[in-house]
Image: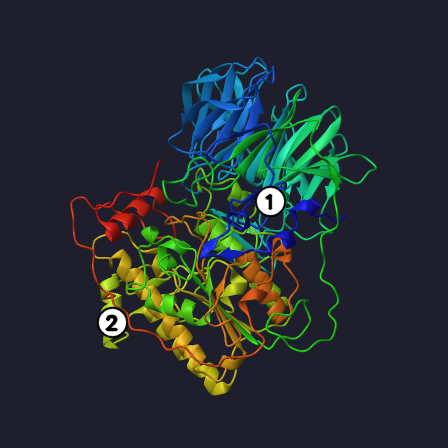
Amino acid sequence: MKSALVTSLAVLALVGVAFSAKKLLFADRVGSKNEDGVLVATGQRAYVPPLTAQLGRRPVDLVLSPDQTTAYVKENRGLSIVDLGSMRVAQEAPVSTGASLGGLSLSGDGHTLAYTDAGDGLLIYGVDGAHATLKKTIKLPHPSIGGMPYPCGVVLSKDARTAYVCLNRSNSLAVVDIDSGRVTSTLTVDTAPFGVAVDEEKSTAWVTCWALPAQKGKPEADASGTPVEVDERGIGTGGSLCILDLTGKAKMHRIKMESQPTEILLLGNTAYATCSNGDVVEQVDVSKETTSKALNLQGDLAGSAPNSLALENFQLYAACGGRNSILKLEAGRKPVETPTPWYPVAIRPSRKGLVVACAQGIGSRGAHGTRNGWGVYDFTGTVSVIDDHATWKPVEDDATTRTADRSEPVPVPKEVGQPSVIKHVVYILKENRTYDQVLGDLPEGAGDPSLTIYGREVTPNQHALAEQFGLLDNYYCNGTNSADGHAWAMEGNATTYYERAFGGFTRSYPFGDDPLATSRSGYIWDNVISHGVSFKNFGEFDYATPVPNSSFKQVYNDFKSGARKIGFKQNIGVARLRRYSVKGFPGWNLDIPDVLREDVFAKEFAKMEASNDMPQFTILYLPQDHTSGENPSAPTPRAMVADNDLAVGKAIDVISHSRFWPTTCVFVVEDDSQDGFDHVDGHRSTCLVVSPYTKHGATISEFYNQTSLLRTIEHILGLPPMNRFDARSPLMTDCFQPTADLTPFTALPNKIPLDEENKRSKTAVLIPTKGPDMADDDVLNRILWRAAKGSEPYPSAR
């Protein structure tokens, strides 16, 4: 069975973006509204039902009071309680350790609430209607592999004296005596348990797990400390449903499941489980332990992400995060769907209708914006009631790639398989900047210069490139941080794990090192390699280490002097990517300047030119614009951004002065727009499209995003879409012209010394930089603002 977004969500409706008087019309940008909902950064419309409460945070789970008048919401910062009569937030109870994935259970009498945090805590609340009081926090055992157990799914016994808790990193189910606060037993299950259902009468627990144990002789990879079976792409091969005898008299039974099994609903002799990354809802015959598919979207493009279930009046419903919709599943009939806010993660039945919690709700342009701009972390998650007035429409087939007709070569073919004049694509990925931060001072675009902290003086090359090859002022990152940012940039999708982990990425902060987080459709290089397109990787998914271990100053001086005594050790988690990676090129490590990376790239490129052999697809990772904040001995933020800018300019200088220039296109983007503000939306970011065929000197205000970019690359290289997001995103055709202007680009010198060091200060706030985004985003934003603007007030109303 194939599927589609509700027709009204079609991305084709987004391409008519207008531009007037150097200002984007509000109706044409992210955050704009029409009868189909709010335009969000993925290019979808997020419908907001009339009965909707805005939370200003990201929900991950939901339970209702016995009288169905109150919703208790587990969200990334704590517990929120919503009065479903007034649709207002009645109470917010912050949890300092954060909360992720899922894990919320209410006793039958409605007076005890169990809640799992993002570390090692089981929180027990006393509940009285729309008010909850924390009674105790029970510490759960840590895994033998080290670190936190990462509790998620939880179920309270009928007498509310026992809790059954999934320990995601411990690969076990903990049985907890609530009165004593003791863990009475831990039962081993498969890898990464997520959800649990308990049949107390039969003393049986059903646990969804994201991976099977690794098998001897089969490919495997590390997943948060546990080896798991992977396919040739380095992606987990599927999960399981573990059936446990709670008395300990019988061995565990296992039923193999599709990828990322999440929520499980136990109904007598039948169980249903959502497999979010497998795009199915499994129906399990409990007595026979056999499965069939109650919903099968696998014939469709990947990315529907069913991840929550509800049963109302003997009718089964599935919340599909990737579709922004709820599907009604009727035996013998094709499913129908109704739209929701952005990324539904939990649905529960009530007398008023289906109550649905959505992780991203209406995006980052809600009531929690800054005084003159939005940050990408300004979440406005929602709780809505889908009542009898909801419109249900048939689930339609996804658009598929049409057979290409013969045509003359153009820069971006309309159909996959038609020829392109472009033969080589270079994809340059950087870290964490918004449009206004960097290009907001350009008068040709819809910018707010008051939010610009890395303007022309710091980024002369990016400014010159935008002026020469076209300025995009309506381009967005689909995601939020480097975890889901690299997923969107390399997979064109972010799975349920990313969407539900913002309360604490305790399991992993994936950078090619968690095979259970990756979309079943794979990475862009999998698409490239499987279709015989040549490929080379410079730095993506690599954690680099200087050898010998060295500071930034030592590495920079060694490079500048030409001594080159310091080498670099690579650490790339995806085995397939390692085989296509340039060995001497260092990836993530903020002690390594980008100009050094560009120098390695330039030397390798010279070999390509000498042999007349340039890959059709190249990834070049330049991460230094992330910055190290005000850490002592590190370069200042503006020096690191200037370093990044110079490396970008020099790389394009090399390419544009080469024999490959007439048939090359370079895309330069950020992985996300996490660190900073933008007056249009926190997801708006920079995008440079550099080619002889791009519209020189133009301002391009069409809506584009990361999946638009991926789709454009796919059409240029003759590749089919990976999933429903790149397939439905608009091609970036408005950036291109039919004739070539072969004028090359000459890099501009930096105006900021690249080794300008942070001054030591007692007031300096140190941030961790071992991996991307380890610093608190708000802390780093404040550091960067202060470094650039001094005493000027920080643009936040929070």
* The quadrant where residue 399 appears: bottom right
Q: Is residue 746 above or below residue 327?
A: below
Q: Is residue 427 above or below residue 245?
A: below
Q: Residue 388 got which mark?
A: none
* The quadrant where residue 567 appears: bottom left
Kind of residue at disc 2: Asp
Label 2 packing within 10 angstroms: few (<14), some (14-19), many (20+)? some
Residue 259: x and y, percent? 63, 46
Q: Is residue 704 above or below residue 251?
A: below
SS for dot 2:
helix
- For image coordinates 41% across by 69% down, the residue present is 467
Kind of residue at disc 1: Arg
| Front residue of 792 and 697 | 697
Q: CB of mark 1 within 8 Å of CB of mark 2? A: no
Residue 222: x and y, percent? 50, 51
Q: Residue 558 got which mark?
A: 2
Residue 406 seen in render: yes
